[in-house]
Amino acid sequence: MSRSGLRGRLDGPVLTVWAKHDRDSDGWLPLWRHMEDSAAVAGLLWDTWLPASVRKLIASALPGGEQDARRLAVWLAGVHDIGKATPAFACQVDQLADLMREQGLEMRSARAIGPDRRVAPHGLAGQALLGEWLKERHGWTVKQTGQVTVVVGGHPWVPDGPCDPSGRSDRQKKERPFDVVDPADIDLAHPLTVVLKDAWDQQCR
């Protein structure tokens, strides 16, 4: 049976990456499903809830007008949790991390990483990952990427300011050295994130 949507573009280890886990039931939601759900809700909110004045304001900055504006809103909602496709996030639930390891997605345990995992929250990791991908795959400049990736880096709290390719915000550079975390725990070149972003990019065309 053929599958549609993002699921139809994915196969293998990427399907084991998790986004949500319920401690009471031990149930979990895969990241690809969370991406699709988030995008669908964003599309519904754009169509039925967002004031026309706000839609027009966003559309005025884009060449394709409101069509481009809706596409951008849906895309940003879809990729907002891409930073969860990193070892620094995935290691938090042992059984789900083990499921990913069984598919070849190696990562250190949460205990091995320790409290320094907080240096790479999934929002900031996602901002860095998305920025690198837009530059490498689509030729965007740093200034261009920053205009949209800050949305990813800012959730679920507030935007963290400009972010360099290593994922460090200006604030974090001053507060704590980023290199206390093993690069593998953030893994800006993780093939999994490339697969997810490329598949999502194709779906949004």
Image: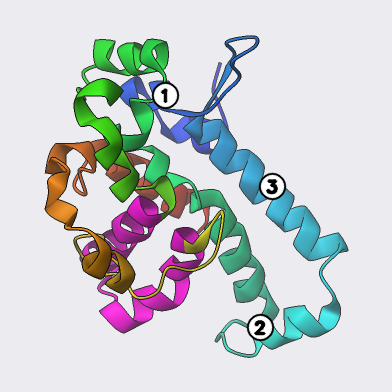
Q: Can you give x and y, in whole percent of width and height, for residue 100 in the image?
A: 32, 18
Mark-to-mark CA distance, 1 and 3: 19 Å
At label 3, counting other C-alpha atoms closer than 10 Å, the crowd grade (few under 14, some 14-19, many 20 or more) is some
Task: Give the residue type at disc 1.
Answer: Leu
Task: Report whether 156 appears left or right of 109.
Answer: right
The residue identified by callout 1 is 15
* Picture residue at 69% right of the left edge, 78% below the top: 66
The residue identified by callout 2 is 59
Residue 171 can be seen in this image = yes
Task: Report whether 123 appears left or right of 110.
Answer: right
Of the numbered discs 3 and 2, the one sitting upstream in the chain is: 3
On whether residue 151 falls in the magenta region, the answer is: yes
Q: Can you give x and y, in whole percent of width and height, for residue 96 in the image?
A: 41, 16
The residue identified by callout 3 is 40
The quarter of the picture where the N terminus appears is top right
At label 1, counting other C-alpha atoms closer than 10 Å, the crowd grade (few under 14, some 14-19, many 20 or more) is some
When the figure is inspected, residue 90 is found, relative to residue 201, above or below; the finding is above
Task: Report whether 116 appears left or right of 124.
Answer: left
Task: Give the residue type at disc 2.
Answer: Ala
* Magenta part of the chain: 124-153
Mark-to-mark CA distance, 1 and 2: 34 Å
